[in-house]
Image (cartoon, rainbow, N blue to C red):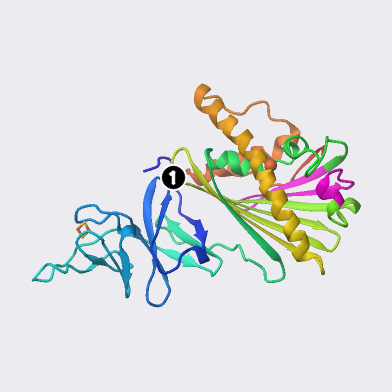
Amino acid sequence: MMKNLKTTTWLSVCRSRTLKKKPLKKEIMGQSLVLFRDSQKKVKALDDICPHKLASLSDGKVINDNIQCPYHGWEFDGKGACQKIPCNIETVHNVKTSFYDCHDDGDFIYIKWGKENIVKPQFPILKSHSWSHFQYEIKAQPLAILDNGFDCSHTCFVHSGLYRSQPHQKVTSNIEFTEMGVKVTTVEEQNIKSFVGRLIPGMNSGVAHTDEYKGPYSLEVNYHYGNIHHLTYLHAVPIDEERTQVIISCGIKAKLIGPLLNLALKYITDKIIKQDRKILASQEENRKRTSKQPAYMQKSDLASTYLKYQYENHFRIQKKAMPNKILKAEFFL
Ligand code: FES
Ligand SMILES: [Fe+2]
């Protein structure tokens, strides 16, 4: 069980297509869950421990609307109620295990963590775009991963030559608080000296992008270069105290060259993630060894600072008041 989670949220746990007929084991938030589809293909999620003698339900199979434990064949429905105990002569009532609310939008499967009523997540896989999806397990905390996705300055160094190059031009970020997080709009960027800058037509004539933190565990990033729209979703869901599952979906909309660009971006994204993993691993290692926290935040770190503020707000019962204004930061990119 993980500590410090006092919020209700929908967790993006996997892509919809990964859950087929067989039950799927998923480790999230320090717990093991089993996901399965009932006869109507509706997604159900239970604790992956049979309450009888603790076998894993995920090793069992789905029978009609129930999941059957592999050990003694007890069957549980999607609400965790035991519907059948094959070796028992009399009917047994009130045998149950925990269940979780699920939401399957056809692209992602989400599980609700916590009991409050909250709106369903909105990360649509737009039909107008060509998509690539990536899934990784990273040894780092979600905050460090989200911060990495939010942090423009590091791209000039970690992804130098690939995505950006040494900082050489002044840009402006407008930072605004949203109900769930922070939205950062960065304008005035042009002439991107990198592989991506050369690859994508229109990238050098002016780029506007928004990085939006949708707390507690997701980012939405929009880049517009000319007529091209590049949309990225990132979900960083804790597996346990040390590991995080990251699902990244990149969609590109570009007349005619969309699928081709998509192929190139698939290769680039994979490379970018490899570069970030190395940094994230070293950060995590140093954080654990020394218990130090990031310090000396600058104007160019304003977005990071507010992301951290909102991230921490998600896990407090008593929310801190938010500054109700749009903030501006100028820095070199
Ligand atoms: S352990 Fe599951 S039915 Fe016995
Ligand atoms: Fe990065």
Q: Residues within 10 Å of mark 1 (few under 14, many from 20)?
A: some
Q: Is residue 299 magenta?
A: no
Q: Residue 111, image x and y in percent?
A: 45, 59
* Residue at image coords 40%, 42%: 2
Where is residue 46? Give x, y as percent: 34, 60
- Report helix, strand or loop for mark 1: loop
**In the rendered view, does 10 fall on the left or right side of 250?**
left
The residue under label 1 is which amino acid type?
A: Leu
Per the rendered image, the range of residues in magenta is: 172-198
State the image coordinates of residue 20 (x, y, percent, origin top left).
Answer: 45, 68
Residue at 49 percent of width and 63 percent of height: 18
In the image, is residue 33 above or below residue 166? Answer: below
Res. 296 in view: yes
Ligand 1 sits in quadrant: bottom left
Q: Is residue 268 above or below residue 250?
A: above
Question: Foreground: 295 or 190?
Answer: 190
Quadrant housing the N terminus? top left
The answer to which quarter of the image holds residue 179 is: bottom right
